[in-house]
Amino acid sequence: MSKRIQGVILLGALLLSFGLGFGLAQHYRSVDNLSHKPVPAESRQEMVVNQDTPVVLEKVFTECGHVVTGELENRKNLVGKTLEEIRQQYPYKEGYLAWFNEDKSLVIHQRVEGWCPEDDSKCHLGVYKDHVAVYRGPAGYNEEILRITRIKIDSLPTEVREEVRTGKMEFTNETTLNDALESLDEYE
């Protein structure tokens, strides 16, 4: 058999395979739609918040990514409202999403600019150029420098230098940070 005939046969087989695949995909879509179970009548009714509906507020903080979950204050203002009415009260353009879970609880998800309450007061030591610097936020977030000290990183003992460089010197507030900086001042 010549190479030309083999090429034509191969091309024909490829086109046939492609055609069959396309046809089966179209057929699967129409069959797949039939496999879904109808939605029960009680699920089709629009859900409304009542006195017993659990309402969860999820706050997601943009700086640290932490999610803080709690109950919504003024939840009584939602009683009798549909999901659409709730979404109007808590709009997407203001950082909200709202939905009902399968357990019929209402979730209001809020995007909050900044740090979560736990991380908001944290600060840590890091390096800026060749000096020890104080960064806002937990270790690993080196985006906002609060101040640069006069302490040169190379003047510190090796162990302390590595703790600063690796971000292990994290503090829950500026008071404990200042205490640590006073002890490092002797190496200045």
Image: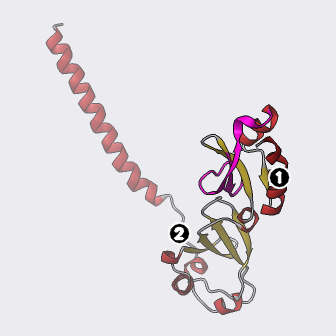
Q: Callout 2: 10 Å neighbours few (<14), some, many (20+)?
A: few
Q: Is residue 95 magenta?
A: no
- Please tell me whether mark 2 or mark 1 is closer to you in this view: 1
The x, y position of residue 78, in whole percent, is 64, 89
Q: Magenta residues?
A: 132-157
Please report whichever mark, 2 or 1, sits nearer to the chain's N-terminal start. Answer: 2
Under mark 2, the amino acid is Pro
Task: Report the residue at 67% width, 48% height from top.
Answer: 140
| Residue indicated by mark 2 | 38
Task: Report the residue at 34% width, 38% height from top.
Answer: 21
The x, y position of residue 106, in whole percent, is 66, 77
The x, y position of residue 136, in whole percent, is 67, 58
Is the image coloured rainbow, by chain, by secondary structure, or in one colour?
secondary structure
Q: Is residue 140 magenta?
A: yes
Camera sees residue 139: no
The quarter of the image holding the C terminus is top right
Instruction: Tally the numbered discs.
Output: 2
Tell me, for residue 182, which label it has, or none.
1
